[in-house]
Image (cartoon, rainbow, N blue to C red):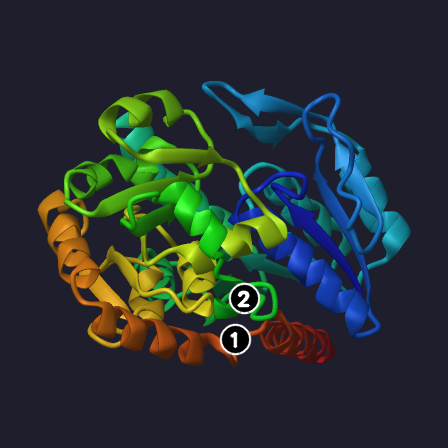
């Protein structure tokens, strides 16, 4: 099968869309298929990802105003030319917003089936960054995804949101996790001593440092006795969070095996963002054998079994976050039980297993298109 993956982000970017697009391309190659990736060009001076498993066509881009870590593709003939040259059986649109919309239009002109992967809660972001615009964001989401042969939602909550807002042909496609890289035996006692020299319980957050993540909800956790908050990631809120989280250790952006070592060294993982369509970092923490505290909203509802692998708390509730952390920090047996259950719950969610589910979606879309043409 020949596939063009049109993605709004790709490594060296570090985010959920980029990571999922990379894993999709790798799986297609591993299964003997022929993918091509079309993505915005990274910032000047940034080389292409050396681990890219296939050819990557880069489209000129500019940084998003106020959020330079995000690159927005400019209009370019490269996208249509790539589709014509590669002759794909299906176009895979990863988080379509700007480049993906053009990819959808090009696929329609060429008569190529398109599968759109919903990954970002644009309506929630509109509420955070503009204070309004949620209805307009849903109109755009609906118009983009209605043109696809199938929309793949990463969680039950995301699927429900899409269907409630009139998006047709929605199916569930979760995300995989690298259970070889992220595993409990990467726990590093030397790193523990460096991060918590007085034997504190290490409570970690991993992700973008941006307003929609609400990392400031960890302020109360910073005041708990015997607890050290560790923050991994970067973003526009970095400066404000350094003031809001006294005593927290900020490690910046970490990736690969280094990130896996940090995950496994945590005593507890906390995610604070209420707008996650999936939440890959929760799954990576669970694969690392670490119990999770997360908001009872969006993707974490599918991932965290409350009272078995972690605790779900009301979104935006700093007191609930603090109390959940306090309870687990004081109970090592409960943490150990939750961590073991968390690891067991994700062992079957490998990228290979999830990638094969994606191939099934492709096959079903292609079969439906052939049936429609024959009729």
Q: Position of residue 145 (x, y in %)?
A: 50, 54
- Residue 350 position by quadrant: bottom right
Q: Position of residue 106 (x, y in %)?
A: 72, 46
User: In the rendered structure, are the residues bearing label 1 and label 2 in contact, judged by CB atoms less than 8 Å apart?
Assistant: yes
- Residue 334 position by quadrant: bottom left
Q: Secondary structure at mark 1?
A: loop
Q: Is residue 139 visible?
A: no
In percent of the image, x 52 and y 75: which residue is there? 349
Q: Is residue 35 left or right of residue 355?
A: right
Q: Secondary structure at mark 2?
A: loop
Q: Earlier in the sequence, mark 1 or mark 2?
A: 2
Q: Is residue 217 left or right of residue 277?
A: left
The residue identified by callout 2 is 177
In percent of the image, x 15 and y 38: which residue is there? 223
The residue identified by callout 1 is 349
Closer to the camera in the image, 315 or 306: 306
In percent of the image, x 54 and y 57: which residue is there? 117
Q: Is residue 327 above or below residue 141?
A: below
Quarter of the image containing the C terminus?
A: bottom right
Closer to the camera in the image, 368 or 265: 265
Q: Is residue 144 visible?
A: yes
- Bin the neighbour count of mark 2 within 10 Å (Cα to Cα): few under 14, some 14-19, many 20 and up: many
Q: Is residue 208 left or right of residue 196?
A: right
Q: Is residue 121 above or below residue 291?
A: above
- Residue 282 position by quadrant: bottom left
């Amino acid at each position: 099968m020949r596939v063009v993956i049109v993605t709004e982000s790709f490594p060296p970017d570090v985010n959920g869309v980029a990571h999922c697009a990379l894993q999709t391309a790798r799986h297609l190659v591993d299964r003997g298929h022929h993918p091509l990736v079309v993505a915005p060009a990274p910032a000047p001076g940034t080389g292409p990802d050396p681990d890219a498993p296939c050819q990557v066509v880069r489209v000129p881009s500019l940084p998003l105003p106020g959020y330079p870590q995000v690159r927005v593709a400019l209009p370019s003939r490269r996208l249509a030319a790539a589709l014509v040259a590669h002759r794909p059986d299906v176009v895979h649109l990863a988080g379509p917003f700007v480049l993906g919309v053009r990819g959808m239009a090009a696929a329609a002109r060429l008569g190529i089936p398109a599968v759109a992967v919903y990954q970002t809660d644009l309506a929630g972001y509109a509420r955070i960054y503009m204070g309004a615009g949620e209805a307009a964001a849903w109109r755009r989401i609906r118009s983009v995804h209605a043109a696809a042969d199938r929309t793949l939602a990463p969680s039950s909550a995301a699927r429900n949101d899409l269907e409630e807002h009139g998006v047709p042909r929605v199916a569930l496609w979760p995300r995989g996790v690298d259970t070889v890289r992220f595993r409990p035996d990467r726990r590093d006692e030397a790193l523990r001593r460096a991060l918590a020299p007085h034997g504190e319980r290490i409570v970690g957050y991993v992700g973008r440092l941006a307003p929609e993540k609400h990392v400031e909800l960890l302020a109360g956790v910073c005041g708990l006795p015997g607890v050290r908050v560790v923050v991994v990631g970067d973003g526009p809120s970095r400066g404000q969070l350094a003031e809001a989280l006294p005593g927290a250790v900020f490690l910046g952006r970490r990736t690969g095996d280094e990130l896996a070592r940090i995950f496994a060294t945590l005593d507890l993982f906390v995610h604070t963002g209420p707008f996650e369509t999936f939440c890959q970092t929760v799954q990576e923490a669970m694969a690392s054998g670490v119990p999770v505290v997360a908001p009872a909203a969006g993707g974490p509802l599918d991932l965290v079994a409350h009272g078995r692998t972690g605790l779900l708390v009301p979104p935006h509730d700093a007191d609930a976050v603090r109390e959940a952390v306090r309870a687990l920090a004081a109970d090592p047996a409960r943490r150990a039980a939750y961590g073991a259950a968390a690891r067991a719950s994700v062992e079957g969610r490998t990228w290979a297993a999830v990638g094969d589910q994606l191939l099934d979606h492709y096959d079903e879309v292609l079969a439906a298109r052939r049936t429609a043409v024959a009729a």
